[in-house]
Amino acid sequence: MVRSDSPDRAELEAQGWLVIARSWGAGLIVDDRRRDRLRPLVDRVRTLVDIRELTATDADEALTLDRETADDYPGDVATAHEALTADRATPTADHRGWGAFTLDGRLVAMTFADSGPDVTETDFTVVRREWRGRGLGTAVKAACVLALAEEGRRTFRTGGSMDNPASIAANRAVGYELDEEWLTFAGGSQSS
C-alpha cells in the first residue's frame, strides 16, 4: 500500500504490480463558521431519528448494527473494518460514538471516533442498509465533530474506499477535504 504520489508507485507498476483498491484520506479543521454549518446537517434528520452520543448501555445495539453491516465495507486492507467487540462497542473517554435511533429505540446509524493528543480520527461510520440515502451517515458524523469541537477538538481526520461515493459525499458535506489517495497493490514479478 503506497500513496498515489509516492515514487514507489512507478517502481511497483514497472514490476507488474496491479492496483486492486484505492482509498482516500481527508482532513477537517473546525472553527466557529464550520460549527454553524454542521448544526443543520444534524437538525435535518430530527423528524426521522434521534441523534445522540452513544453510552455503555448502547453497546448491544452497536454490536447488532455492526454484525448486520459487516459485509458492507468496500475496498481492501486499507479500508477493512475490524468487527466490533464488546469492549470496542463501549464508548470510552478517547473512543466515543454517536448514533441515530428510530422512535422505537433501534440504532440505525453510528460513527465512532478516536481522539489522540492532537487529532481526532474517525474509526468508522455505518448506516443500516434500509436507512441509507437519508443523510443519517452525514448527520451522525456531523454530530460527532460538532460535539467534540465544542469540547475544544479542532483537527479531524477520516478516510475510506474510493469505491464508496456515498461516504465521500457525506464527508464532503461535513467539510472534510480529501488530501490523500492510497493505492493497494497486488501481484508483481516478485510475488509467487
Image (cartoon, rainbow, N blue to C red):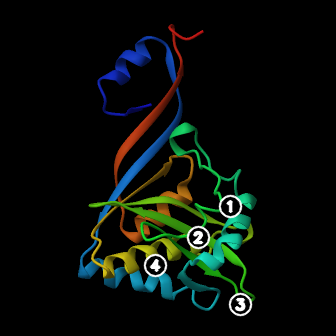
Query: Alpha carbon of mark 4 to alpha carbon of mark 2: how far?
Result: 10 Å
Callout 4 environment at 10 Å: few (<14), some (14 to 19), or many (20+)? many
Position of the C terminus by quadrant: top right
Callout 3 environment at 10 Å: few (<14), some (14 to 19), or many (20+)? few
* Left or right, 109 with reference to 174: right
* Left or right, 96 with reference to 34: right
Sequence-wise, the earlier of marks 3 and 4 is 3
What residue does disc 2 label?
A: 110
**Which quarter of the picture shows residue 180?**
top left
What residue does disc 3 label?
A: 103
Viewer-side residue, 177 vs 95: 95
Point out which mark residue 155 bears: none
What residue does disc 1 label?
A: 66
* Residue 151, x across and y down, in percent: 32, 80
Sequence-wise, the earlier of marks 2 and 3 is 3
Residue at figure coordinates x 36%, y 16% from the top left: 11
What residue does disc 4 label?
A: 143
The amino acid type, in three-letter code, at marker 2 is: Met
